[in-house]
Image (cartoon, helix red, strand yellow):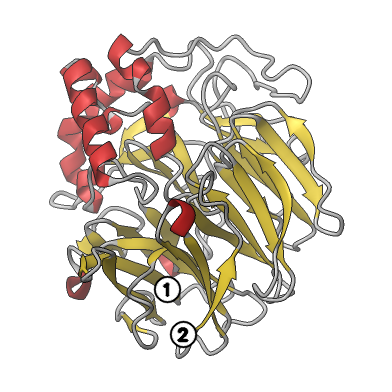
Amino acid sequence: MRSLSSAVLAAAALAATTLVPAKEARANGRFPAANQLVRSPTDADVFLLRTTFGVLVTHDAGASWDWVCESAVGYGGIQDPLVGMMSHGQIVVGAGEGLMQSPDTACNWAPVDAYKNLVFADVVVHPDAPTSAIALQSNYRAADDAGAPLYDNAAIGTSDNGAHWAPLGPALDEHLLLETIEVARSDPQRLYVSGFRGAGDTLEAILLVSTNNGAAWTQKPVPLDGKTERAPFISAVDPTNPNRLYVRTGGGATSRLLVSDDAGDTFRSVFSGPPMLGFALTEDGSKVFVGGTNGLFEASTTDLAFHQTSKIQVQCLTSVGSTLYACSNEASGFLLGASTDDGATFKPVLHLNGVRGPLQCGAGSSAATCADQWPVLRDTLGGSAGDAGPTDAGLDGSIAGGDGGPIVASSSSGCGCSVAPRTFSTGLAALAGLFSLAALGRRRRR
């Protein structure tokens, strides 16, 4: 997690293991939650959902979800590593332990040997070239004579579905802690990277811009308030205009959404509120959605005048075609929901008790090692969604199963359902606020 210091995370982990009984210490001591959804660019039925207890995979458009444990992928601790899906089942994960890949939609995993034990802050798959991806490395190296941290920073690229990775160009500014990377759909040579140096009154938020696929970079300042905002996170680049980008601020009690129409030369603030945990831009670039604990908000990109469409508690947002997907929680009515009316109502796609079990792979596969961990996780998730049934709707919003019927979360009533959230131990509940802060880290746009 890049938004909290290692000392805070270590204290949180220690407190969780101290206060929470061993059987309840699942998901790294955090509440079971989902916070990133990605779809395969070559198979519309395949989605991957990142959670605080591993990753979930569906091969049938959300009718069923199978679990892959963190240890099978190759990461651990309190972090939400960034996930990208490439062509034909290839998955890449950037984490604190390095760059990991799966060639077969999460059954087998292996690290990219050249980048073992290096910290990766972000991963992005080229929108119109899914055999190509970029991973952003920002690995602490040492401190300079003044005590400021120095980092090994690089943008690492592949164009052959992960078979080979190499730096796109020279190393990036070693004084920056890098956070996010994006590539423009309409100009694949245009790359944006965000990062920062210093803190408080000395904070400098920086946007790096490349017009030649990382061969050279130009630095531009991002307007942040060092007292209330810690870092800039690139949320999206307009699909038709490579000069328009959306940047959210994070790391404090409030967030702003900044928009630039001149490739980062200037920014204007268009939205502010509690920390933004979700961002989505429609595929045609006409609408933008943001959300957090205060609900879901939507605006046309022509005027960026936001209005609230729902009171659900947003953990992630993803727009695919005419459907908006939201990660939320059982208090809002679902772990993952789908909306076809711009977020006014949602149909549940997945409840916590809807995870079918470990992903079934061949003997000796990486995912096969998760079977021993499943019974305890199953007990932890099993009582979370009351009697609503495991899955009420597929990812297209159609009803797929479950005996409780669809749950509709409306802007006026929040959730029109009778879901009984799981009762967690007193110690874990007391740490919920701290872990919510940790969740602000690697959530660049979802």
Q: Are marks 1 and 2 in contact (CB under 8 Å)?
A: yes
> How many labels were placed on the picture?
2
Image coords of residue 21 (percent x, y): 19, 15
Residue at 48 percent across and 51 percent down: it is 230
Residue 399 left/right relative to 120: right
CA–CA distance in space, label 1 to label 2: 10 Å
Chain-order first, disc 1 or disc 2: 1
Looking at the image, is mark 1 or mark 2 nearer the viewer?
A: 2
Q: Is residue 89 in view from this perspective?
A: no
Q: Secondary structure at mark 2?
A: loop
Q: Which quarter of the figure has residue 11?
A: top left
Residue type of the residue flagged with mark 2? Gly
Q: Residue at x 36, y 46 (%)?
A: 80
Q: Residue at x 45, y 59 (%)?
A: 202
The residue tagged 2 is 214
For residue 290, say whether it is visible. yes
User: Relative to 288, is 54 on the left or the right?
Assistant: left
| Label annotation for residue 134 | 1
Q: Nearer the viewer, residue 314 or 382?
A: 314
Task: Compare residues 35 and 11 and report the one nearer the observer.
Answer: 11
